[in-house]
Image (tube, helix red, strand yellow):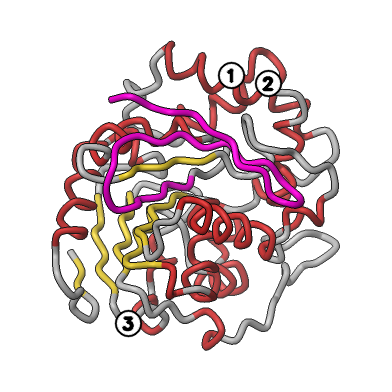
Amino acid sequence: MKIEHRFVDFDDIRLHYAEAGAGPLLVFIHGFPEFWFAWQHQLEAFSRDHRAVAFDMRGHNLSGKPSEVKAYRPKHLVADLKRLIDHLGGRPCVVVAHDWGGAVAWNFAAAHPEYLEKLVIINSPHHVAFARELRDNPAQQQASAYMNWLCRPGAAQKLLENDCARLIAMFTQMSPDTRWLTPELLAHYRAAWTQAGAMEASLNFYRASPLHPPTPEEPDGANLDINPEHFRVPVPTLVIWGERDTALLPGLLDGLDALVPKLCVKRIPNASHWVIHERPEEVNRLIREFLDAGEVPAVAEI
């Protein structure tokens, strides 16, 4: 597999992306605290018959890093994806997204469904479900408490201390099988985390988010009044969920079929939030089956 690294400059941001292969466009979007390299196994598998592209979201690795928190509001993240797909010329395409990338992809699919042939979400909650669970579910409130810590001043410095020990702990403490955390992979991640301004910028995703768990100042959390009709996703969607995710609990899947009519959910019981690393072959198989299938039946679940 030959990976080409490219940059595209828009009015307000420069985005870096890695691409391999030729064919229908398949775009991968990483989460926190990752970058394009998170998708190395998927790039290898799908570049055989797709133009597989994984990009660094703004604030991460080699992409631009605006200093203002407001530059990381959801509308800007959605605009980045829309402009990148236009630049790549692959509309409609398939988007595969994890964690924060999934948050962007859910918004994008609701706002611009004409850009998507299919959508794959991996351990990333739909906004309506996440708002509900942060409001009503004490277990999810506790599981998401780290979000408030990440918003504090000085959090970036803490995460980078001791050769990024706290960031690595986010992987090791959540993953039941850490054999995927090789020295080579950690070297790539440390290099991305220590890019000038990258860690502070990546935390701005949390600071700019309208969703957060309760705090002493806001005991009800964000308590947003979200109209589900504004976030309906008409695109055929596969959700892959590692059920041992300790940050995003399985209750976030409840009621998802009301928001995503063409939904297929695949649960992986012994995998965590880091399922794309722990079970890459299984994840790739599920994505491949979904891409090869015709119309997605209304709510299929395993």
Q: What is the distance, in whole Å, between disc 1 and disc 2 at their CAs?
A: 6 Å
Please state the horizontal and vertical placement of residue 84, each as a whole percent of the image: 54, 52
Front-lying residue, 176 or 276: 276
Whichever of labels 3 and 2 marks the residue nearer the N terminus, that label is 2
Name the residue located 30 percent from the left edge and 72 percent from the top edge: 236
Query: Above or below — where is 301 with respect to 49?
Result: below
Q: Position of residue 58 (x, y in %)?
A: 66, 44
Q: Amino acid at mark 1?
A: Arg
Q: Are marks 3 and 2 in contact (CB under 8 Å)?
A: no
Q: Quadrant of the N terminus?
A: top left
Q: Which residue is mark 3?
A: 261
Q: How far across and how far down the image is residue 126, in percent? A: 48, 68
- Decide: few, some or many residues near mark 2? Use Cα within 10 Å; few <14, some 14-19, many ≥20: some
* Element type where label 3 sits in the image: loop
Q: Residue at the spot x=44%, y=57% of the render?
A: 249
Give the left or right position of residue 91, taking residue 211 as reference: left
- 221 or 118: nearer the viewer: 118
Q: Earlier in the sequence, mark 3 or mark 1?
A: 1
Contact between labelled residues 2 and 1, with CB atoms less than 8 Å apart: yes
Picture disc at residue 190: 1
Q: Which residue is mark 2?
A: 194
Magenta-highlighted residues: 1-29
Q: Residue 297: name its quadrant.
A: bottom left
Residue type of the residue flagged with mark 3:
Pro
Residue in the picture at 73% in, 72% down? 220
Q: What element does badge 1 sit on?
A: helix
Separation of residues labelled 3 and 1 (CA atoms): 40 Å
- Secondary structure beneath label 2: loop
Dominant secondary-structure state across the stretch colored magenta? strand
Please, what is the three-letter code of the amino acid marked with disc 2? Thr
